[in-house]
Amino acid sequence: MSSVRVRFAPSPTGFFHIGSARTALFNWLYARHTGGTFVLRIEDTDSARNSEEFLNVIYDSMKWLGLTWDEGPGVGGAFGPYRQSERGAVYKEYLEKLKAAGRTYEKDGAIWFRLEGERYEIYDEHRQKTVTKVKTAPMVIHDAIRGRVERVEDEDFVIVRSDGNPVFHFVNVVDDIAMRITHVIRGEDHLSNTSKHVALFQAFEVTPPQFAHIPLILKQNGPGKMSKRDQGALIEEYQTRGYLPEAVVNYISLLGWNPGGDLEKMPVADIVAKFDLPGVNQSNARFDDKKMAHMNMLYLLALPPELFIAAARGYFAKHEVFAKAGLTTEPPAPYVDEVLLLSQPKIKGLEELPAYTAYFWSDTYPTDDKAKAKALGKGDPKARLAELLVALPGLDLTSDASVEAGLKALAESKGLGFGDYQAVARVATTGLGAGPSITAIFRVLGRERVAARLERFGQVL
RNA sequence: GUCCCCAUCGUCUAGCCCGGUCAGGACGCCUCCCUUUCACGGAGAGAACCGGGGUUCGAAUCCCCGUGGGGACGCCA
């Protein structure tokens, strides 16, 4: 294990979104790349806004994405506890250090951090009030992604609230010191805070960790950074929509980072091998759900049959697809597997599956009017239907090839093409204009059901 | 308003650090091919160096200024 220690420090005040996931991922990737330690620390100092529900969402989402932590809640570690709400003693100890150094004072019941320098008053237009500023030397931050950043921190700030709870800036720095964090990889929205943090590190006489401020993810429509309220922002949502976690990981790893070539789809092990801080971009990235969906399709397509079946079945169970289709018992496993495999090369996402396969589960399925009109629009569909019904008992349904041979023979005997039968047979047996090959549909559905559907369709013509 | 960060196709980006290529790839869009529908796949079209100065024989690449975008300015994190 290398000496690298990184942490992801979410606060359970809202759902786990793409931006948080990407920050967690970059920390995890860096830890895995360097053979370091990935720490999960829960920043729950704002008791008014925290909730256990959100905490569980964070754990679930991280586990789903495969972002396992080496130290943190549930797994322990030498620097625990890992929830800030349980670290009161640590903060008290560090607060004493600051007090002893004369770097704190009380005002309005809160404890403030005292910057060193000459004080003066000035009217702040933004806040519309007079504030006390301090003439300080600029803080210099050596950022692994931004380079040298200089910022003047010129106002004292609260480190312990009047209710006794310590504030983010303070606990964040204290824990990074106490947990021996070597690299702070976080969103660029924290860059302006970093001067506060450096001031605190200096007050504790500790060399600050290596900072790396990663670009933000912008919402795909409209201005501003992505927030938990935006469309497609929640990791949870991709989980319920049946996205493959490795696809999500792959896609978000490419938001603000790239291996420096044309490579896009790559196994997570390759991402780990290639990931490094210098490869991280400096400019913000806009989220694109189309590209995410495409990545997911690529992964779905590449899934070995048994894994695709497992994923699809997981989706079906989660969404109670069979129950919603009106079935009291699940269809036989081999039948279900066959139907699922038929669909694998055709769909872009698992969420398409219920609608895509509905006619395999139930004999009552909707008929798409457009598809019907199109199928009935040319030739003599009624005659084709009748011919299919005549030929059906003699059709060899053992394989797609044999069904195809049979249908082609029928078409040839009438001086027609395969397509003349395909269109009407499809809409009759599935109600749709698109789907797996008609030969596979015949074979999997079976002679009886196909016959019944063809007949029923013929009657309403 | 103050401070900080950033700037290549509509989007994600390669190229930039260490100036010299028809500025490359991917998503999306469009066309064609494959085909039994729909996908997948294949081929192709269209599409960008934010603007202005400077340095240089030569600038997407280095410097400055604009402009634009983003972020921070809480007893939130």
Image: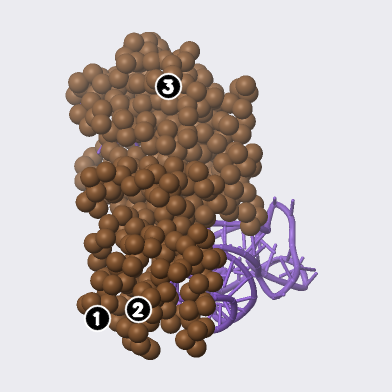
The chain identifier of the residue carrying mark 1 reads A
Give B69 or A270, whichever is nearer the viewer. A270
Image-based side of A302 in relation to A104, left or right: right
Residue A385: which numbered mark, if any? 2
The residue sitting at 58% across, 31% down in the picture is A32
Position in image of residue A6 (x %, y %) = 51, 28
Q: Say which label, 2 or 1, has the lower sequence index.
A: 2
Residue A461: which numbered mark, if any? 1
- The Cα atoms of the two marked residues, 2 and 1, are separated by 10 Å
- The Cα atoms of the two marked residues, 3 and 2, are separated by 65 Å
Q: Say which label, 3 or 2, has the lower sequence index.
A: 3
Quarter-wise, where is residue A162 in the image?
Answer: top left
Give A258 or A264, whichever is nearer the viewer. A264
Asked if badges 2 and 1 are on one and the same chain, I answer: yes
Q: Dot 2: within a 10 Å radius of its alpha carbon, few (fewer than 14), some, or many (20 or more) residues?
A: many
Per the image, the residue denoted by label 3 is A72
| Type of amino acid at the residue the image marks with label 2 | Leu
The chain identifier of the residue carrying mark 2 reads A
